[in-house]
């Protein structure tokens, strides 16, 4: 199967442009449009994109699972799947402890175990609505066993909503292998990390329940440095030093760098981040690290470069930057 090329539309894009950009992405031949959850809710732009397109898939990459109850997630996903005639992908993530506790005011609990339960609860709820079955989900974190006709939205034509999850460490990869339809790889990754951490983790989880790796669609969000001239590309590389330094200062991502012998860089970056030494952090990112984490090429060749690096390793990719109508179109 050929590599699917998707696009991300960032939340700093005016919501009034979502329809226009989504329509352009579909007409340009992209396979899926993804919306993240940062400074805005991710589900509203999914609905707008769905209204302005006919065939392209639309998904969240990712929506936060824990600030929402499984029931509220179930209603939103069900309605979006109905609106998009089966083109919706529900991508879920956990965020990190600090944001869950201090930004959302929610107790942080075992993220892998709790996310598993969210997914199991979602499927139990959807099964209830689709097949008119009694709802009786009982888990460690959620007990959901009430569904009266007044609150039941009823069946839809495409009830099998794909659930993707995002993660970094092997335990989340195993969870994806066991019960998910897709796995989203963080942009701070390397091909070696995908081959040695992500894929073996997914395979281990899949084997546990009699599934195959091919049952889980792998999606990678990718840092790119591109432009019409070498000067443009070099400027983008310098900007990415700062971006990669920012992510690498979070110790959650240490295993990615450790794989290449750069574990001590994470410790230095973390210390500098606490001091606010942002310029010093960028200087820690070497040319070798940029080559490992960034796909580079002119605007007329960047798609070919993405395909060269990722074909046969993942199923779909999207550049980390937001699609705004012109970037990437030269090489499509």
Image (cartoon, rainbow, N blue to C red):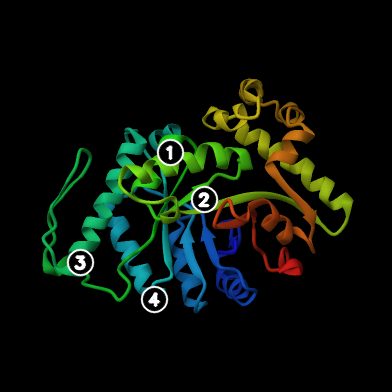
Pointer 4 with pointer 3, Cβ within 8 A: no
Q: Are marks 1 and 2 in contact (CB under 8 Å)?
A: no
Pick whichever of labels 1 and 3 is earlier in the sequence.
1
User: In this rendering, which labeled residue sits more in front, label 2 or label 4?
Assistant: 4
Instruction: Give the residue pinned by disc 4.
Output: 85
Answer with mark 3 or mark 2, whichever residue precedes in sequence.
2
User: Residue 39, image x and y in percent?
Assistant: 51, 50
Asked which quadrant contains residue 300, the reply is bottom right
Q: CA distance from mark 1 to mark 3?
A: 33 Å
* Image quadrant occupied by the C terminus: bottom right
Binning the other alpha carbons within 10 Å of mark 1 as few (below 14), some (14 to 19) or many (20 upward) gives: few
The span from disc 2 to disc 4 (Cα, nearest Å) is 28 Å
Q: In this orientation, which residue lies closer to the viewer: 57 or 60?
A: 57
Q: Which residue is mark 1?
A: 103
Q: Which residue is mark 3?
A: 129
- Residue denoted by label 2: 39
Above or below — where is 124 with respect to 115?
Answer: below
Q: Is residue 7 left or right of residue 93?
A: right
Counting from the top left corner in percent of width and height, residue 301 is at 78, 61
The structure residue drawn at horizontal position 74% and vertical position 39%, both measured from the top left corner, is 290
Q: Which element is circle 2 on?
A: loop
Asked where in the image residue 26 lies, by quadrant, the reply is bottom right
* Mark 3–mark 2 distance (CA, rounded to whole Å): 32 Å
Q: Nearer the viewer, mark 4 or mark 1?
A: 4
Query: Going 32% across and 42% down the picture, which residue do you hit?
Result: 208
Q: CB of mark 4 within 8 Å of CB of mark 1?
A: no
* Residue 209 in sight in this render: yes
Task: Give the mark nearer the N terminus: 4 vs 3.
Answer: 4
């Amino acid at each position: 199967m050929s590599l699917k090329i998707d696009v991300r539309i960032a939340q700093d894009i005016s919501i009034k442009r979502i329809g226009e950009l989504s329509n352009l992405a579909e007409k340009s031949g992209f396979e899926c449009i993804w919306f993240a959850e940062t400074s805005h809710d991710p589900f509203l732009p999914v609905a707008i994109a769905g209204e302005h397109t006919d065939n392209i898939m639309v998904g969240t990459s990712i929506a936060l699972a824990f600030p929402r109850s499984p029931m509220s997630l179930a209603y939103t996903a069900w309605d979006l799947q109905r609106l998009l005639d089966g083109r919706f992908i529900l991508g879920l993530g956990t965020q990190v402890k600090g944001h869950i506790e201090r930004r959302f005011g929610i107790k942080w609990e075992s993220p892998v175990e709790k996310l598993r339960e969210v997914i199991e609860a979602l499927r139990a709820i959807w099964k209830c609505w689709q097949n008119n079955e009694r709802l009786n989900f009982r888990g460690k974190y959620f007990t959901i066993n009430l569904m009266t006709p007044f609150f039941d939205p009823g069946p839809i034509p495409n009830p099998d909503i794909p659930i993707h999850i995002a993660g970094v460490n092997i335990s989340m990869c195993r969870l994806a292998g066991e019960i998910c339809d897709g796995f989203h790889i963080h942009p701070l990754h390397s091909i070696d990390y995908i081959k040695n951490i992500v894929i073996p983790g997914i395979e281990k989880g899949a084997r546990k329940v009699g599934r195959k790796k091919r049952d889980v669609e792998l999606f990678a969000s990718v840092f790119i440095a591109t432009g019409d001239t070498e000067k443009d590309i070099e400027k983008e590389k310098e900007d990415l030093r700062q971006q990669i330094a920012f992510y690498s200062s979070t110790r959650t991502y240490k295993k990615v760098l450790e794989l290449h012998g750069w574990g001590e860089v994470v410790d230095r970056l973390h210390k500098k981040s606490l001091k606010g030494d942002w310029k010093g952090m960028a200087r820690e990112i070497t040319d070798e690290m940029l080559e490992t984490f960034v796909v580079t090429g002119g605007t007329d060749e960047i798609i070919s470069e993405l395909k060269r690096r990722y074909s046969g390793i993942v199923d779909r990719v999207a550049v980390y930057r937001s699609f705004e109508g012109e970037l990437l179109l030269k090489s499509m």
